[in-house]
Amino acid sequence: MSGGRVMAAVAAGAVLYGGVAAAPAAADGGERRVTVFVTDSGSRPGELFSVNVRGLGRPDARQEATASSPAFAGPVRLTAYWMDLEKEYSFQAKPAIAESARPGSHPLLVAVGGRTVAKATVRVAPAKRPEFSVSASPGRAQRPGETLAVSYDDLYPGETGHTFTVRSEAFDGPASLTHDPDGSDWNNPRLFSALPAISRQAKDGVYTVTLSGPSGQVLERRPITVRAARSGDADYLGKARGPLFFGLSGSPEDAANHYRTKPGGTFNVLWTDASPDPGEETALTATSPAFQRPVRLKRDDSKAADGSDPRYYATARVRPDLDPGSYPVTVVSHHQRVKRTGQVVVTGERKAAPETEGPGRPALLAGVGGAAVAAGTGFVLWRRRAARRAGNV
């Protein structure tokens, strides 16, 4: 039961008890009507029950306000707080339904200074076994990168433990389930939840989500189906365009689906998509046998607010030792469902890679430069031999 159904007025059950004489007197000597608001649907044993009372006037330390019911473990004190909008005090408490409470309706009595001033009804629902829930999108499989809601309702007499974990090969890692006392289900103190994401790398298939308890023991298992959106699916909105190319001094608006460059040249690779898959924006990559390395495309934030489709680009560098010819440039997106290829034409002679002698050390004798070094070395040796013959060394 969520907090959205809490604090509903029970007008028929909240009445003056014992006639007008039981109601607190108003400041002008008249009688004040006391109204009680309670949780409006059945509460299970262990669940928190909301009581809110108005019309009791100013709090009086000499006359404590309480609420009692056979559904509670004992009387509970009502705490006063000021409501600016209504210009009056409200008295409230959130007792737990006793684990021994029987299903059905139970009386609720509100008392001030020991005198009963109003009554209402507490409806108790039967206890139910712990329940593990894994949300699934109605009518379709889970998508890679999509958030999955999991919960464990452990509200059952005798259940303990406050640490629960879910694991699945569809997740990037385990996720811990926690209880949020300020959330919409505040009234269930043993409702634990988490929002793990389906991995962007998850392949199509059926996976198992496993719930483990505090000691690592397996409590429940649930299957989920993962499948990336395909063209024609209702949630497939991808309208990819590219890869396109433009020079370093050019503009994305001038990009074309082919580009001419020389070995060792650089240029930009551009990709646009009306609706990338969840989590895909940080993984778009352009690959080509002409590139020194794959190019990770980055979002162009300057186009974030003008209504255009999101676009991504980065600089690619062509291998300097590349032979002339046409080379493909490929971008794959929407979890392998969209694949586009453009062409880069390499012209001109390739640049020979420098020869080496030993790791990272240029050869001494290479081409004309090497010959010059050899000649110089021979001249020095000739001078030394001549000097020895003359007796100078």
Image: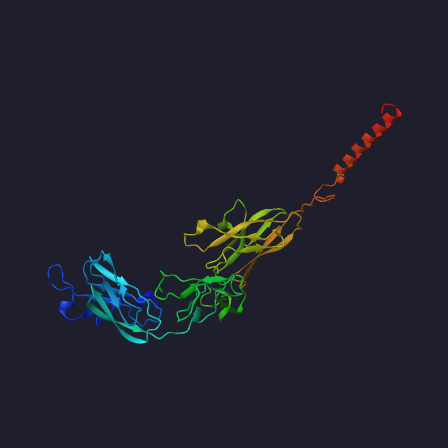
Q: Quadrant of the N terminus?
A: bottom left
Considering only vertical position in the picture, is 380 above or below 328?
above
23 and 306: which is toward the camera: 23
Considering only vertical position in the picture, is 275 above or below 126?
above
Q: Is residue 337 left or right of residue 114?
A: right
Q: Is residue 326 left or right of residue 365?
A: left
State the image quarter where residue 257 is shown: bottom right
The residue sitting at the left extreme is 29
Considering only vertical position in the picture, is 261 above or below 372?
below
State the image quarter where residue 68 is shown: bottom left
206 and 44: which is toward the camera: 44
234 and 27: which is toward the camera: 27
Q: Position of residue 190 (x, y in %)?
A: 39, 66
Q: Position of residue 91 (x, y in %)?
A: 24, 61
Q: Is residue 211 left or right of residue 7?
A: right
Q: Does residue 145 appear in the picture of this structure?
A: no
Q: Does residue 360 appear in the picture of this structure?
A: yes
222 and 198: which is toward the camera: 222
Number of callouts in the render? 0
Q: Which residue is at a point 27% across and 70% down the rendered structure image?
A: 69
Q: Is residue 239 left or right of residue 67?
A: right
Q: Position of residue 173 (x, y in %)?
A: 52, 61
Q: Which residue is at a point 23% across and 64% down the rendered structure image?
A: 53
State the image quarter where residue 22 is shown: bottom left
Render colour scheme: rainbow
Q: Quadrant of the C terminus?
A: top right
Q: Position of residue 10 (x, y in %)?
A: 24, 70
